[in-house]
Amino acid sequence: MNRRTKTAVLGLGAALLVTAGATGATGAAASASASTSASASASASASASASGERQREAAALTGRAKLYRSAGDDITFSFDAHLAAKDNDDPLKATGTFEWSHYAGGDGAWAKAEVDCLLTGGKVAVVSGVVTDSDLPGAKGKRVGITVHDTGRQDRLGYSWASVGNPVETKDLPKCVGSAPFEKVKKGTGDFTVVPWNPKF
């Protein structure tokens, strides 16, 4: 083998080594990148799963809307009631508040209650609570119950004092007791959202 041929072979060998090294490095980098990506994806998936679990409550009733009255009464109800996943077997551990107000011809009142029970079945919810603040004489300390039907179109609502006309007139009302949801929400004023409860019987 002459000097020129030997030089060419050595040069080719060096080129192959350089190419192989570069390919190996690229492959290693790609492998590391894929591994990092897979790890990040798994982490994100686990995080999303954990987040989803945290967000999925056992039951809930939320939202705000006005009721429809042909006479023009201004009646508003708002809910922020929740039953945590860890309390799935005990609706009496529900937390939150709900408020309502009713005004007509300049007269009326408002009240706020602390939730002491929440039951939901499908898109129907019954929540009860004790009035903690109100400008209606005699209302504080009274338990009231509200029923909501989340129809997705025009929600309905009923309340425990429907037959007596005033929350103050309800006596010794048990927890989670309301009336049939006979009232309709006024279109365009909001709506209510019910998270179905799945009891483990």
Image (tube, rainbow, N blue to C red):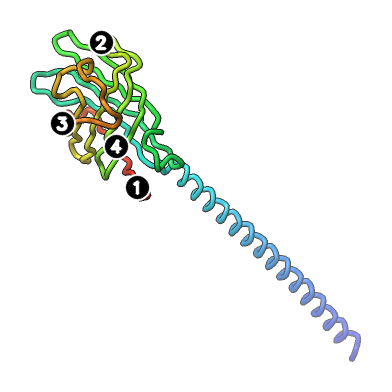
- Estimate the x, y position of residue 77 in percent, counting from the top left: 26, 24
- Report the residue marked by disc 4: 193
- Estimate the x, y position of residue 51 in percent, counting from the top left: 49, 44
Q: Quadrant of the rendered structure where residue 69 is?
A: top left
> How far apart are the alpha carbons under marks 2 and 4?
28 Å
Q: Residue furthest bottom?
A: 1
Question: In the rendered image of this protein, does residue 31 appear above or below residue 1?
Answer: above
Q: Earlier in the sequence, mark 4 or mark 1?
A: 4
Q: Quadrant of the rendered structure where residue 92 is?
A: top left
Instruction: Residue at 26% x, 8% y: name it.
Output: 137
> How far apart are the alpha carbons under marks 4 and 3?
15 Å
Q: Does residue 138 appear left or right of residue 185 in this picture?
A: right
Q: Earlier in the sequence, mark 2 or mark 4?
A: 2
Label 2 or label 4, whichever lies nearer to me, is: 2
Q: Does residue 85 appear left or right of residue 187 in this picture?
A: right
- Report the residue marked by disc 1: 198
> How far apart are the alpha carbons under marks 4 and 1?
16 Å
Label 3 or label 2, whichever lies nearer to me, is: 2
Instruction: Residue at 26% x, 10% y: name it.
Output: 138
- Report the residue marked by disc 3: 184
Between residue 91 and residue 149, name the one nearer to us: 91
Question: Type of residue at label 2?
Answer: Leu
Label 4 or label 1, whichever lies nearer to me, is: 1
> How far apart are the alpha carbons under marks 1 and 2?
37 Å
Question: In the structure shown, which secondary structural element does the residue marked by tag 3 occupy?
Answer: strand
> How far apart are the alpha carbons under marks 3 and 2?
24 Å
Tell me the number on the disc at residue 136: 2
Question: In the structure shown, which secondary structural element does the residue marked by tag 2 occupy?
Answer: loop
Quarter in which the N terminus is drawn: bottom right
